[in-house]
Amino acid sequence: MDLLDGEPKSGFQDLLGYHLAEWSEDWAMLELLVDRRHCNRAGAVHGGVLATLIDTACGFSATFCPHPGRVRRVVTLQLTTSFTGQARHGILRAIGRKKAGGSRIVFCSAEVLDETGTLIAMGEGTFRYRGGSESPEGVPLSGF
């Protein structure tokens, strides 16, 4: 199922290999199958990969657009991360939730869980809607 409604993957998404598994109003879930490219010299998933999943899950949670052929976008203003465990293999799931906000600025949080459901990272972010993305109608995909 194409949850992005025909929008191409970003280059960074292709590089890391995560995908949008579920998406609805104020909520998003990403999945990543861990392989060697995601790991640091100690063999654990690199903190930068986990921070990316947190940032991206938060961003998606704030930008669901129910209108076909239209999109919403945010830019990250601030992101905090906390690492609570390690993963070396399996599927990671990043679950983002929009928590609060106004017409231009929103606040989101995310958790990254390993395949057993153990929390390995969490974070919060502040995001600003790009022009035209403030409303659920978003902007035409061709406009980006």
Image (spheres, rainbow, N blue to C red):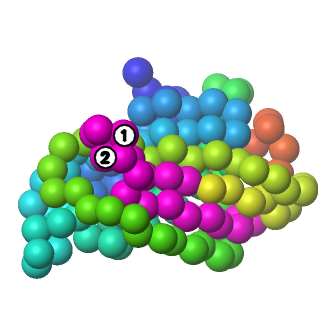
Decide whether residue 125 is among the magenta residues. yes
Label 2 secondary element: loop
Look at the numbered discs 2 and 1 and tell me whether their residues touch, using CB distance below 8 Å.
yes
Residue 117 seen in the figure: yes
Residue type, label 1 = Gly
Q: Tell which of 118 and 81 is nearer to you.
A: 118
User: Residue 4, image x and y in percent?
Assistant: 50, 35
Question: Type of residue at label 2?
Answer: Asp
Taking 96 as reference, is 100 left or right? right
**Which circle marks residue 117 in the picture?**
1
Q: Would residue 10 be seen by someone viewing this image from the given angle? A: no
Dividing the picture into quarters, in which one does residue 107 lie?
bottom right
Could you tell me residue 45's position as x and y percent? 23, 64
Q: Which secondary structure type mostly characterizes the magenta part of the structure?
A: strand
Picture quarter with the C terminus:
bottom right
Residue interval drawn in magenta:
110-132
Q: Is residue 69 above or below residue 91?
A: above
Q: Residues within 10 Å of mark 2 (few under 14, many from 20)?
A: many
The image quarter containing residue 52 is: bottom left
As displayed, is residue 106 above or below residue 79? above
Q: Measuring 51% from the left and 44% from the top, which residue is drawn there?
A: 95
Secondary structure of the residue carrying tag 1 is loop
Labels in figure, total: 2
Query: Cα distance, mark 2 to mark 1?
Result: 5 Å
Residue 140 in percent (x, y) is at 68, 41
Q: Which residue is mark 2?
A: 114
